[in-house]
């Protein structure tokens, strides 16, 4: 069995560059504006975060933890040259060219929850009273989190109000343990976020969580169940757990406390997810939920398993298939626009092949 120190080093080596670029500036004073004919879309991303404010105002929020929940909204453009499943993210030496890269044109900060609620309620009313909450994973800088949710919204064709819940990931490959603790700290504030949205004008709240973000999400749903409000007053829609970095036994315990959901939670897994295999080494070789293929076992807890093992992703570690497989992200968007259940595992696979 590898030592924890060796496992951390191994995890860092393999994950370096595969999940996200190093944290960098989200804003710049020199945006190279592009004509509307060269922009594929413009998106308003509402943000609640447990990150502290960055010393460099262009980064907006850093990897440090905040004792309070912070609120913001980012306007992000997507270039016409964008390819579905990808994030055309500028490098440190690149100019913020709207014709080439995802570009945050401005960020509005809200110093109180009422001001944030006023802004988001207006957007919710204008967009069909639906909200999608996205919870990112390990090794994610604030800029990468904003761009990822923008890509998911854009490529899926989601028309409701997107909300990024950004917990205080350190945004470094060696920070797995720090990120795990930051995820623990964030549970209560994700609960605050979900309760706040339930009190808004939204009629339906969907959740998409990725990697370590699924652990934050499951812990928060468990807390809601303990208080007797597990479905947010009937407003909770789909819960999608993509490549979940959770111990299988821990997940079963969480589901036992939550209870069998009215609408099955959707688990997107892949047996070839190399990032989760390394996470399993770090955790003591216990199976991670994102690589656990016993669908019948999980079905007893009210979980629908979609096995993506035979599908391709664009990163070599197969950890981001939910977002970087163009056909799958389109199907995910279709699901979020509908009110019936997810298709079966076989139906999903067949539809992906038809769309490729």
Image (cartoon, grey):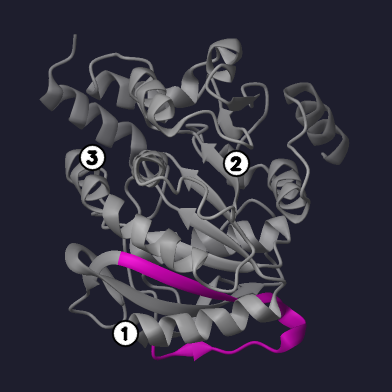
| Quadrant placement of the N terminus | top left
Vertical position of residue 53 compared to residue 230: above or below: below
Q: Identify which residue, 131 or 328, lies in the foreground.
A: 131
Residue 265 image position (x, y, % from top left): 57, 35
Query: Which badge, 2 or 1, comes first in the chain's sequence?
Result: 1
The residue labelled by disc 2 is 322
Q: Magenta segment, which residues?
A: 28-49
Residue 328 visible to an observer of this rendering:
yes
Is residue 313 a member of the stretch shown in magenta? no
The answer to whether 213 appears left or right of 102 in the picture is: left
Residue 85 image position (x, y, % from top left): 64, 51
Could you classify mark 2 by the number of other residues whose Cα lies within 10 Å: few (under 14), some (14-19), or many (20 or more)?
Answer: many
Residue 59 in which image quadrant: bottom left
Give the Cα distance between marks 3 and 2. Answer: 22 Å
The answer to whether 140 appears left or right of 230 in the picture is: left
Give the Cα distance between marks 1 and 3. Answer: 31 Å
- Spot the residue most to the front: 228
Residue 83 visible to an observer of this rendering:
no
Q: Secondary structure at mark 2?
A: helix
Vertical position of residue 11 compared to residue 346: above or below: below
The residue labelled by disc 1 is 112
The residue labelled by disc 3 is 176
Is residue 32 a member of the stretch shown in magenta? yes
Q: Identify which residue, 224 or 103, lies in the foreground.
A: 224
């Amino acid at each position: 069995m590898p030592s924890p120190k060796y496992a951390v080093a191994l995890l860092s080596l393999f994950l370096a560059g595969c999940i996200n670029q190093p944290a960098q500036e989200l804003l710049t004073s020199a945006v190279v504006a592009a004509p509307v004919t060269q922009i594929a879309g413009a998106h308003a991303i509402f943000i609640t975060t447990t990150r502290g404010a960055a010393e460099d105002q262009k980064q907006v929020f850093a990897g440090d933890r905040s004792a309070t929940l912070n609120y913001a909204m980012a306007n992000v453009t997507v270039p016409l040259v964008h390819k579905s499943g990808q994030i055309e993210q500028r490098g440190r030496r690149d100019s913020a060219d709207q014709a080439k890269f995802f570009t945050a044109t401005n960020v509005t900060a809200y110093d109180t929850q009422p001001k944030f609620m006023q802004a988001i309620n207006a957007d919710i009313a204008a967009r069909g009273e639906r909200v999608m909450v996205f919870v990112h994973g390990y090794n994610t800088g604030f800029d990468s989190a904003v761009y990822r949710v923008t890509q998911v919204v854009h490529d899926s064709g989601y028309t409701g109000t997107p909300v990024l819940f950004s917990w205080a990931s350190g945004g470094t490959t060696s920070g797995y343990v720090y990120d795990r603790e930051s995820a623990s700290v964030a549970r209560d504030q994700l609960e605050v976020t979900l309760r706040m949205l339930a009190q808004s004008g939204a009629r339906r709240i969907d959740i998409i969580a990725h990697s370590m973000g699924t652990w934050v999400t499951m812990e928060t749903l468990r807390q809601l169940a303990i208080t007797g409000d597990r479905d947010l007053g009937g407003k909770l829609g789909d819960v999608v757990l993509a490549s979940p970095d959770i111990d299988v036994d821990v997940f079963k315990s969480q589901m036992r406390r939550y209870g069998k959901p009215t609408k099955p939670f959707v688990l997107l897994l892949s047996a070839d997810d190399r990032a989760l295999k390394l996470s399993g080494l770090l955790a003591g070789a216990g199976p991670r939920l994102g690589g656990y293929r016993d669908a019948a076992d999980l079905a007893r807890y009210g979980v629908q398993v979609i096995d993506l093992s035979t599908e391709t992703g664009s990163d070599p570690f197969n950890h981001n298939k939910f977002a970087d497989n163009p056909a799958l992200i389109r199907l995910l968007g279709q699901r979020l626009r509908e009110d019936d259940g997810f298709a079966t595992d076989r139906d999903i696979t067949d539809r992906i092949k038809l769309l490729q």
